[in-house]
Amino acid sequence: MYKIGIIGHAADVLCFSPLGFTVFESENAENAGTVLKNAVKSGEYAVLFITEDLAADLGEEIDRYKNDPLPAITVIPGRDGGKGYGLANIKKAVERAVGADILK
Amino acid sequence: MAEIRVNPTRMELKKLQARYQTARRGHKLLKDKRDELMRRFLDVVRRDKELRLRVEASLKRAYGSFAVAEAVSHPHMLREALMLPKGTSELHVTYRNQMNVTVPDFVWRETVAGKSDTYNYGLAFTSGELDSALSELGAIRDDLLLLAQLEKEAQLLAEEIERTRRRVNALEHIMMPRYLTAIRTVKMKLDENERGNITRLMKVKDMMLETRYKEKHQFFPDEEEESG
């Protein structure tokens, strides 16, 4: 049995708590990185959502778990709206597989 | 290009030919695998992209509703209201084999006490806006999970495609040409040996004939003059 975690600024992620997600409040990328590392290490989380503003500075840390079946680390937009980081990730995967971005 | 160095013997030639055939068969299989992986990957990516756009739009709306709920509630009250989940919930993970890639599937199960569809907060200090914001968020929870699943699948498939593509290229541009060169070299050397052997045999035959001719004329020196 696994859990779903969400990492982000309190204002962005607090609303996910009633849905059953475990909320990790992080005010900066450094702290979010540590939280992410600990959450993955615990092995309790199969899905971890992280808000874009924090994920932007944690690219390397997130990429580390890219090739493992678990956890699925997914970037979602925060309250200030998406900057296209999630779509950029899809494009990156396409470029990796195909060799060129064919989703344009 | 580094060459494969082998002894030019028929045994080695047969071995090399067998290895070349295996490489060719492997190359064909891997190429087919790459094509199928690519087809599945593009399908996943298209669904992923569509879903992401939809989820992002829904999240934006939900955040908007939540901002309204925040505006009409006291921050401490809000934090307290959001503290507890609706019920006990757990995420079940099953694994699927996609062309030898292990892909997770997520199923969310929630047990709510008393089968109630209300959230775990009192109605006295919370607003109706909070209810609607949460129901909006609740509506996209399954989509969020599906998004996580599709993105994971896309990443894992991308990795496998990259690896398969490298293998196909290595077989096509490095291994197979190397085997072909080695086979050609061994064949040429064997042919050369064969030619050397034939020449040697011809030479030996000539020498033998010459010796016999000489021996014959040594004992019957007049024979040639008579016949001539």
Image (spheres, helix red, strand yellow):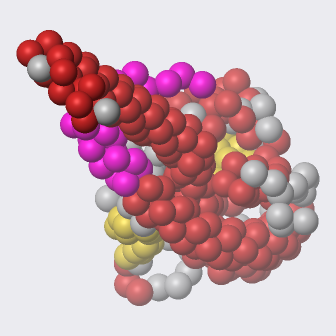
- Give, as a single range, the part of the protein colored magenta: B1-23
Using the image, determine if residue A62 lies above or below residue B80.
above
Where is residue B95? Give x, y as percent: 36, 65
Q: Is residue B151 left or right of residue B56?
A: left
Q: Nearer the viewer, residue B115 or B136?
A: B136
Of helix, strand and loop, which mostly describes the magenta segment? helix
Corner quadrant of residue B77: bottom right
Single out the residue that lies furthest toward the left: B219
Residue B41 in the magenta stretch? The answer is no
- Residue sitting at 37 percent across and 54 percent down? B21
Using the image, determine if residue A100 lies above or below residue B109.
above
- Residue sitting at 61 percent across and 61 percent down? B154
Where is residue A45? Give x, y as percent: 45, 49
Where is residue B150? Give x, y as percent: 59, 67
Locate the N terminus of chain A by quadrant.
bottom left
Single out the residue that lies furthest toward the front: B226
